[in-house]
Amino acid sequence: MDKHEPETVRSTSSYVNNGNINDHEGDMIRWFEEVSAKAGAVQTEVLCRILKENFKVEYLNKWLLVGKEEINVAEMDACALESLFTSVVPLSSHEDFEPFIQRIADGDTASILTQQPITTLSLSSGTTEGRQKFVPFTRHSAQTTLETFTLSAAYRSRVYPIREGGKILEFIYSGNQFKTKGGLIAGTATTHYYASEEFRIKQERTKSFTCSPYEVISAGDYKQSTYCHLLLGLFFSHDVEFITSAFVYGIVQAFRSFEELWRDLCNDIRHGTLSSRIKVPKMREAVLEIITANQSLASRIEGICEEVEVMDWFGLIPKLWPNAKYVYSIMTGSMQPYLKRLRHYANGLPLVSGDYGSSESWIGVNVDPSSPPESVTFAVVPTFSYFEFIPLYRHKHSCGSSHDAAAADDFVEDKPIPLSKVKVGQEYEIALTTFTGLYRCRLGDVVEVGGFHNGTPKLNFICRRKLILTVNIDKNTEKDLQAVVEKASHILHSQTNNNAELVDFTSYAELTTQPGCYVIFWEIKGDAHDHVLQSCSTEMDAAFVDYGYVVSRKTSSIGPLELCIVEKGTFKKILDCFVANGATLGQFKTPRCTNNPLLLNILHACTLKIFRSTAYA
């Protein structure tokens, strides 16, 4: 273990150093029960350790001064240091750290954000804000990822026990690592993790092993990797204990591909071959070393596919993987619209929501794996970072309100409070102070405290704070948008005799015309009459309940909502666009609201029909 690894990581690891899986699971759960019971005190100690290790760095040094005298941080007790830090160091955003991180990327070796050198940077997907950003990545980052997955697996195993030595069908993907101007290794956080020792250790500790070798995970072509993931998952179909991906989008995307590829997959299993579509040499070699001809398995899969294809693939997962106990993935926020299709594939197989984290830090784990994804909460792990919570209160519009272009969202905020002071039912934005050099950095997520696990809060993810639709005095969040799309999709489904299905959607606020309006793009599978789609457009327009939107529509200061139907494969083009710019499939989240010109160009070029709402007419 790295001698510079923070003490919190070492103390966590001491609970998981036995060889037996039951010992690991029991130790991890006992450890978390212990630290969650005294979460407030643990948080104070975590901040103390971060600051005593890093108080001399450039970013902090400018705040921890009184006149020209440096405060003696090293001698301060933890509570006094916590009080000082939160009173003199301001709240920040990632933009405040970008100049410092860029200097590190360019080769500046001074102690800028952390006392220990940063040698690796992770790259966000850019799907949320439309651009990628660098985040420091250290051994602590990989270690907390290992601990998150191990702890989460321990709680899942209490509800859904799995066989030791079983396989996991993991739709996981890493991208290319590259070097920055200053020689630092850069790539996505998942790319770093899958290449790390911690990824191997995770499999050994949980006694569950991915079906695919590293050559498939790291091939760099998600379409070829997906084919091989499916092929190997089928080859080991009786050994697969659960199916997983970073985001549920990845699982749904894989099975939509399976609908088109199953005959080729069966042929490869029957003959022990590999399709010519797989062109990456190392991946071909690694897969061909594993598979062998299996005619009976191929015939079994073929029979199942012929059976479920006529039922629109209903129940595909438990039929192909009869020993699978559950499907595990991040299913909250922008992932919720994919749950309907996943449930169709799963036919009652439990869906277990993955854990809560960000590019900056892991935050919480799902300690109640039997909870439905729509109501899941995440227990904050108090050793990972120092967490502050900014209370948020919904704005109340009045008829005389004017649109403030600087107002980023629909919230009024109060002063940040520590983890120990949060209240059930209150919404907050999280701010992070991390071992990797971010200090009081706003995360941008809106969460609600749904309860407590011992002394640590359990968080319900609500939405991204700045992902909103707004034209005038209206402000509708990602969650508001998903609610109205869900209502309209019921119309689509019911009025087409279940022959049409919403595949994906996004939106933007059209501000170049007067009056401006909301534009929502749908890709649908199947056929729908124009009058049905017209009804969907009107239903969405009428379903927004934000007071500012309703008033603006009634006074025609916002125009009728437009529903744009795009051609089949449009959202795959958007995925390809992000992947071409450095993201991986494992990172990808369809942005629910965008002003990204590249995306809008794709969407407009692929639009087949436009339906204008007749609500408020």
Image (tube, rainbow, N blue to C red):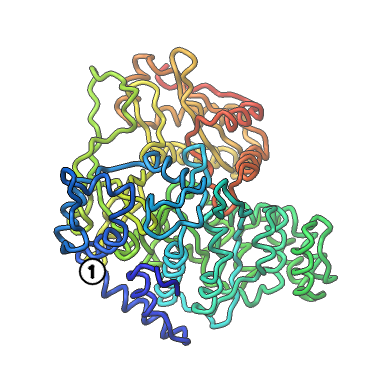
Residue 243: image x %, image y %? 57, 66
Lateral position of residue 58 relative to residue 292, left or right: left
Residue 383: image x %, image y %? 31, 65
How many numbered tags mark residues here? 1
Quarter of the rendering occupied by the C terminus:
top left
Q: Closer to the camera, 549 or 542?
A: 549
Q: Closer to the camera, 149 or 177?
A: 177
- Judge whether residue 391 can be spotted in this image: yes
Q: Residue at x 40, y 33 (%)?
A: 468
Lateral position of residue 570 relative to residue 79, left or right: right
- Judge whether residue 526 can be spotted in this image: no
Residue 566: image x %, image y %? 63, 32
Q: Is residue 463 above or below residue 231?
A: above
Q: Residue at x 57, y 58 (%)?
A: 191
Residue that protrudes farthest toward the front in the picture: 68
Quarter of the rendering occupied by the N terminus:
bottom left
Q: Is residue 214 above or below residue 436?
A: below
SS at circle 1: loop
Q: Residue at x 23, y 69 (%)?
A: 454
Q: Residue at x 54, y 38 (%)?
A: 505
Q: Is residue 442 above or below residue 560?
A: below
| Label 1 Cα neighbours within 10 Å, binned few <14 / some 14-19 / many ≥20 | some
Under mark 1, the amino acid is: Asn
Q: Which residue is mark 1?
A: 454
Name the image quarter holding residue 273. bottom right
Q: Closer to the camera, 535 or 231?
A: 231
Residue 53: image x %, image y %? 31, 62
Lateral position of residue 238 relative to residue 459, left or right: right
Residue that protrudes farthest toward the top in the picture: 514
